[in-house]
Image: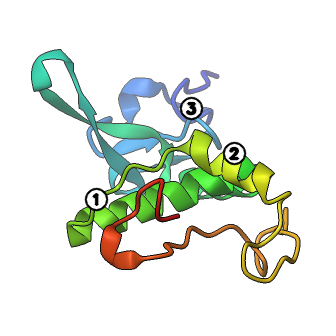
């Protein structure tokens, strides 16, 4: 009996599936409706954009992002930086902080909180990493962090 290369089940082949409505997750190898996969946009040379469906289902993608966020202090800094950049862009506030600057700042502070002098936690939760502005009216620049 034949094994399907798309879903791994016996009794049919890949052509049996409606590829336009189903997709196999590259991570968990399960077959889901196409709606269970995130749509992504890739900017090509010349500014053209191409929309495509992710190869990883939404559930596996969320778990992958969660694991990456929890993997290291650098990844949490990267996440905090992205969130701060997005908020500043939304509010029209200038933003010129980069990841290298934040890493240097953490090292200068000996991985201690600037305000409480308690150690920054390597774990997710209390005493985690955050970006604060000394003077919010000046935006989020190297001189205000």
User: Looking at the image, what colour scheme do you see?
Assistant: rainbow
Is disc 3 surrounded by few (<14), some (14 to 19) or many (20+) residues within 10 Å? few
Q: Residue at x 37, y 25 (%)?
A: 15
13 is higher (above) or lower (below) than 89: above
Q: Position of residue 101 (x, y in %)?
A: 59, 45
Counting from the top left corner in percent of width and height, residue 2 is at 60, 21
Query: Could you tell me if the residues under marks 3 and 1 are in contact, i.e. CB atoms within 8 Å?
Result: no
Q: Judge by depth and name the residue closer to the eye, 112 or 63.
A: 112
* Residue highlighted by disc 1: 94
User: How far apart are the two marked residues, 3 and 1, measured between alpha carbons?
Assistant: 60 Å
Front one among 60 and 145: 145
Comparing labels 3 and 1, the label whose residue is closer to the camera: 1
Residue placed under numbered mark 3 in the picture: 11
Task: Report the mark closest to the observer, 3 or 2.
Answer: 2
| Label 1: few (<14), some (14–19) or many (≥20) C-alpha neighbours in 10 Å | some
Task: Using the rendered image of the protein, determine whether residue 21 is visible from the camera's viewpoint.
Answer: yes
Q: Is residue 21 left or right of residue 5?
A: left
Which residue is drawn at the image coordinates 47% and 58% (left, top)? 143
Location of the N terminus by quadrant is top right
For disc 2, the marked residue is 104
Q: Residue at x 24, y 68 (%)?
A: 90
Q: Earlier in the sequence, mark 3 or mark 2?
A: 3
């Amino acid at each position: 009996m034949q094994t399907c290369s798309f879903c791994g089940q016996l009794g049919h082949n890949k052509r049996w599936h409606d590829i336009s409505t189903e997709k196999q997750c590259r991570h968990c190898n399960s077959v889901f409706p196409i709606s269970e996969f995130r749509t992504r946009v890739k900017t090509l040379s010349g500014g053209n954009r191409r929309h495509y469906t992710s190869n990883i289902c939404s559930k596996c993608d969320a778990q992958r992002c969660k694991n990456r966020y929890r993997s290291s202090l650098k990844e949490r800094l990267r996440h905090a930086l992205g969130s701060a950049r997005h908020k500043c862009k939304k509010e029209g506030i200038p933003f010129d902080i980069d990841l290298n600057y934040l890493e240097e700042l953490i090292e200068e502070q000996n991985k201690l909180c600037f305000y409480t002098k308690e150690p920054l936690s390597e774990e997710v939760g209390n005493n985690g990493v955050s970006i604060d502005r000394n003077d919010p009216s000046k935006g989020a620049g190297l001189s205000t962090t």
